[in-house]
């Protein structure tokens, strides 16, 4: 089974990299771009067929390593 | 005082802090590899600066989960003092030994310069040789030193006096000018609740000999020796 994890900064946490990306896009002729938030995308292959079990294990992985929950949120998506 | 210095793949200030400790104790500290789940008992554990595990995922995130850190957490819980410098601070925060987190510098640039710090308290193992309010000059070298904690945590650490150092102007004024990285409330270093663990982004170990630009970091190590010998 494949899993996709998105890690994003929580609302209210300053994202200077997102801001820099936004400014660059504005300068490149995309004035419609407003607030930009950037994050991480992690794809994992899992030796697990049970979706519920996989989800629970992924939650654990996110809390232990993949995200720092002081500043980040995570979302988990199971694929096939 | 017997000290152990942790070494991760990518650590690079372990030699500097070993020299600083040897300078004040006359004893070579033990160097402990990250894969070692057990190491000799020491009076102090130091987590040095560098780029452990290439700063992959988040600074300090991988190192925080290494075998040696499981043992450090155990000993810290028993009250063994831990000094966490720069990348060490990031590791200790990721490991939950210290509150908050170190984020990318607000201006997105690596900062390498001397900074001024205001000592917030002399009531700790680490700061007993300083006066509260004293201004010291030490170097910083980091890209992720922007201290952040949520509002509740921030209030709690401020109320409990867990801020060790704040970035300030040379005259001691705590303002934006003295802040090299955007840290919330100019926080440069914090304690755990029991004040037995201290993390800071600046490098006191690089300010212990006059010929290398200053000695303002030396009292930190002398104070530890006094408290732990």
Image (spheres, grey):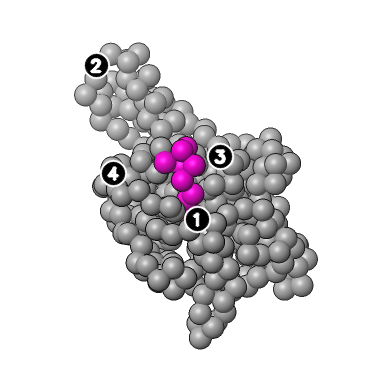
Residue B44 - label: none
- Residue B66 appears left or right of B120: left
SS at circle 4: loop
SS at circle 3: loop
Does residue B194 belong to the magenta stretch? no
* Marks 4 & 1 on one chain: yes
The residue range painted magenta reads: B75-83
Write the residue at 48% across / 31% down: A74
- Distance Cα–Cα, label 2 vs label 3: 31 Å
User: Do the numbered discs 3 and 1 sit on residues whose CB atoms are within 8 Å?
Assistant: no
User: Do the numbered discs 4 and 3 sit on residues whose CB atoms are within 8 Å?
Assistant: no
* Marks 2 & 4 on one chain: no
For mark 4, what is the residue?
Answer: B38
Residue A71 - label: 3
For mark 2, what is the residue?
Answer: A49
Q: Residues within 10 Å of mark 4 (few under 14, many from 20)?
A: some
Q: Chain of mark 4?
A: B
Relative depth, front residue between B175 and B11: B11
Relative image position of residue A30 (x, y in whole percent): 58, 52
Disc nearest the viewer among 2 and 1: 1
Relative depth, front residue between A55 and B180: B180
For mark 1, what is the residue?
Answer: B228
Disc nearest the viewer among 3 and 1: 1
- Residue B14 appears left or right of B127: left
Please tell me whether residue B44 is drawn above or below residue B212 in the rendered image. above
* Marks 2 & 1 on one chain: no
Q: Is residue A35 visible in this depiction of the protein? A: no
Within the image, what quadrant is residue B122 found in? bottom right
Disc nearest the viewer among 2 and 4: 4
């Amino acid at each position: 089974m494949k899993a996709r994890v998105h890690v994003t900064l929580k609302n209210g946490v300053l994202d200077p990299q997102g801001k820099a990306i936004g400014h660059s896009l504005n300068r490149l002729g995309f004035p419609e771009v407003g607030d930009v938030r950037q994050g991480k995308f992690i794809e994992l292959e899992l030796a697990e067929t049970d979706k519920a079990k996989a989800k629970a294990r992924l939650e654990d992985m996110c809390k232990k390593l993949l995200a720092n929950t002081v500043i980040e949120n995570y979302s988990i998506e199971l694929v096939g | 005082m017997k000290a152990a210095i942790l070494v991760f793949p990518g650590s690079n200030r372990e030699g500097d802090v070993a020299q600083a400790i040897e300078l004040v104790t006359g004893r070579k500290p033990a160097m402990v590899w990250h894969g070692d789940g057990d190491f000799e008992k020491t009076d102090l554990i130091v987590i040095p600066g560098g780029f452990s595990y290439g700063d992959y995922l988040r600074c300090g995130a991988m190192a925080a989960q290494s075998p040696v850190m499981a043992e450090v957490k155990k000993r810290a819980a028993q009250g063994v003092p831990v000094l966490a410098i720069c990348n060490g601070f990031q590791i200790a925060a990721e490991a939950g030994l210290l509150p908050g987190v170190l984020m990318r510098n607000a201006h997105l640039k690596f900062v390498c310069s001397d900074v001024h710090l205001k000592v917030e308290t002399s009531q700790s193992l680490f700061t007993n040789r300083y006066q509260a309010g004293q201004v010291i000059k030490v170097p910083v070298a980091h890209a992720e030193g922007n201290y952040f904690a949520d509002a509740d945590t921030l209030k709690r650490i401020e109320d409990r006096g867990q801020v060790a150092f704040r970035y300030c102007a040379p005259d001691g004024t705590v303002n934006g000018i003295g802040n090299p990285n955007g840290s919330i409330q100019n926080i440069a270093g914090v304690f755990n609740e029991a004040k037995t663990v201290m993390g800071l982004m600046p490098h006191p170990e690089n300010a212990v000999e006059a010929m290398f630009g200053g000695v303002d970091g030396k009292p930190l190590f002398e104070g530890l020796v006094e408290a732990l010998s």
